[in-house]
Image: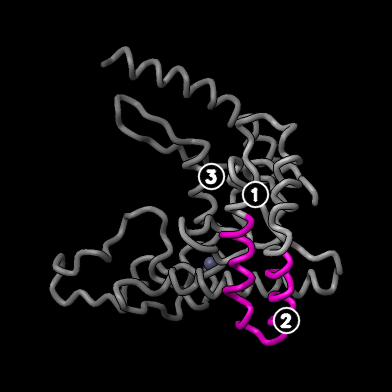
Amino acid sequence: MEITEYGSYKHASVYPYRRPPSQGPGVAPAAILNKKSPKKTIDGKIRQWFRKYKDMDQVYTDLFDDVANFIEENIDAIDNKVANSIQEFKRKESFLLTVDFRDSKISQDFRNFVKNGFYANVNEKYHTRYGVTSLGNGECFHCGKSKEVLAFTSPFQFYTHDKVTYAPGFDRRYVWKQYPVCMDCALIVELGAAFIRDQFSYLFNGIPYLLFPKFINVRGMSETLDELINAYENRKKTLAKGSKINK
Ligand SMILES: [Zn+2]
């Protein structure tokens, strides 16, 4: 077992990750560790993932079965090991528990398997909603390439697709024309939005705001972001104070 440090945005990923639902595993065998009871994460999010996906591809059925059985049989030992490993860290730290294989060939194939499953799952969320599929071939709003573009990719609501009564003849199949975005850009936008919400959101006079930095030069963006985050942390305190005084 290994513990790797990662920052809020500069992390090296093994495969794509998205927070799993409260019940059952997510689209990847990974989840934020339940520190009070590591067993819950090991069993509910990791072991169950291997059970759930073992029949997706015959190549993996036996391997996934073995992994799931191994976890089941050794759950107490794994639970202890995880609990001991995180003991030295501060209470506020959080951990992402995930699985990989030591054999580099298996590891690479496995990562691709998870990645493909993840993409298929995310892709569907981006194009199917209200029981309607909305996608087409067009120019992506962000990268400008002509490719398949999807309808429901925006993390912010600035175009209409929920109220069909707003316009006569509104047809959800063509929602993609309002904000056509390709799969690659959709993922970047989603990550960016999560980052903004995490790092650059604040309350002013009780009203929530998001700050969107715009970079003139992308070179050195990472360093500039670090400076901005620090500066913004301090500014946020002043803003929070201001909002209290005004009340
Ligand atoms: Zn694009």
- Residue 69 drawn above or below residue 212: below
Q: x, y (%) of residue 15?
A: 68, 62
Q: CA distance from mark 3 to mark 2?
A: 38 Å
The stretch of residues the image draws in magenta is: 42-70
Mark 1: few/some/many CA within 10 Å (<14, 14-19, 20+): some
Look at the image and tell me in which quarter the C terminus lies: top left
User: Which disc, if any, is residue 47?
Assistant: none
Query: Horizontally, is 62 left or right of 240 in the view?
Result: right
The residue to which callout 2 is attached is 62
State which tag comes first along the sequence, 3 or 1.
1
Look at mark 3 in the image and give the residue it sits on: 195
Query: Main SS type for the magenta part?
Result: helix
Ligand 1 lies under 8 Å from the Cβ of mark 3? no
The residue tagged with tag 2: helix, strand or loop?
helix
Is 204 positioned to the left or the right of 9 in the image?
left
What residue do we see at 53% from left, 20% from top? 234
The residue to which callout 1 is attached is 96
